[in-house]
Amino acid sequence: MTGRWQVQQAKYTGNCEKLVCEVTATGKFEPNSRLAGRRNKPASVGIERQVIMKDWLRQQLKGAIVSKPGVQTRRWLGLAGSPVANHEIDSIPVAGDVVVYFSDLVNKSYQLEQWLPTLERLHETHRVVLVFRKVPTLRHFRKLTKLPKIFVRRLEDLVSLYAANDFRLCLYVNNGVANFQSLSVPNLVHVHINHGESDKLSMVSNQAKAYDRTFVAGPAAVERHKAVLSDFDMNKLISVGRPQLDSQFVSTLPQFPGRTIMYAPTWEGENEANNYTSMDLFGLNIIESLVAIPNTRVIYKPHPRIATSNTAAIASAHTSICELLERANAVGAQHEVIETGNILDIFEDVDALVTDVSSVGLDYLYLHPENPLILTDRRDNIDKLHRDVPVSRACPVISESSRESTLGRMPELLATTHAQERKELRDFYFGTKGRGASTHAFISAVDALIEQRATELRAKKHNAEATVPLRIV
């Protein structure tokens, strides 16, 4: 039995031509002279053509087999084997008390990176293990911390890892979908700690109900949960401040005799409801207005995901800003484009900040409440902004309707600090804890939850052993 195909894009002496071929009953791939006709080519040319066509077809078939539709088809036909893991886990003890679960790719690693100093402090009293579901992410963190790490690909292996060890508590820095695989294990205390404090809509999710506890920064986060969620147990919230801001940050910029102003836009979010970026609307205009201020160094520090954005307007604005600053530097300016690095270190040299609704502005508020802060509002609704983003009440705001008036008065706006109002808002967002106290509150909360769960499990075990089974007479 033979099968016939018309194969496009077969190379022959550097040109593409249509070949009509057949596969014989022996599985050989040969030109069909009856269909394609002979062109009086030498035998060696025919053999060369066969080799080229075999290689091409092999590549196409291999690509089809490993593609997503190909894998799904094999599974539907019952031809797929078991998923391949890098290793099997079976009764291998892993020393640890606290699991930090992170299932995402490297492009979201910033969510965990900011917690590393706090987790290293926690590791001094409770053994911490970082659990990853992606090998490249584990390898990325290998360069950043000495904390123990393990990669677990399959759900089966994750459950086995938890069952074979005496982990007490699990921390989550985001609401990744794969978190629910870890949440299926009942004995652990599951605690959501997020990766920042901001007024973004994404800061409050109905997924909070899935965790045993949620650590928040302060009163603002409590009010946010109360306003957004229904049927939520507010006792699940524990205020610990912002431990990530307790570290000592070191200046990283060259000395500059004038004023340093940073523009730090956020990214466009997963959807329009979570889109707070100013890049596509005002980004280039903001940089142009800052560059025009005499004796000023501009620092452009975009969110890590802006440089790789697939949104045309944002990618274009990013390129234009970089080119503008490069041209200015070519004639003697000292502006900086910083796409990587710890923004909290850079804050040490920043005299004023222009940013969007995000954790960046609130971190700057906490660390430098005396310095000017300017926010943007892409929705051009100042009443809603003041209601949803309390810090905006003590800041100048750049929006579509205020664009000309604010950008034209940047030096004047940067001279207006609203320092006292921002100090009060700092307490509203982060509580009254001083530097260093948040880390202590975080570790104390972990201590208490571990002890509380251990007491509950001991009580359950005691009750189970004390229960006398009913005897039916």
Image: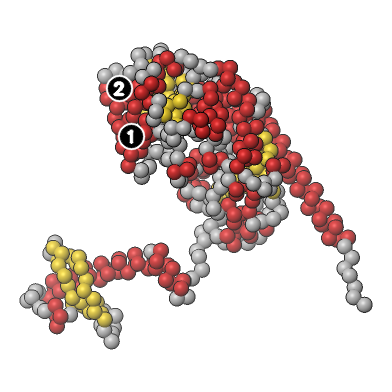
Q: Is residue 352 visible?
A: yes
The spot of residue 377 in percent (x, y) is 45, 31
- The residue identified by callout 2 is 329
The answer to which quarter of the image holds residue 34 is bottom left
Within 10 Å of the Cα at label 1, are there few (<14), some (14-19), or many (20+) other Cα atoms? many
Q: Could you tell me which quadrant the C terminus lies in? A: bottom right
- The residue identified by callout 1 is 317
Q: CA distance from mark 2 to mark 1?
A: 18 Å
Q: Is residue 435 left or right of residue 259?
A: right
Disc sitting over residue 169 in the figure: none
Within 10 Å of the Cα at label 2, are there few (<14), some (14-19), or many (20+) other Cα atoms? few
Q: Is residue 202 left or right of residue 243?
A: left
Q: Colour mode? A: secondary structure
Viewer-nearest residue: 463 or 12: 463
Q: Is residue 367 visible?
A: no
Among the two numbered marks 2 and 1 on one chain, the one whose residue lies closer to the N terminus: 1
- Residue positioned 55% across, 34% down in the render: 388
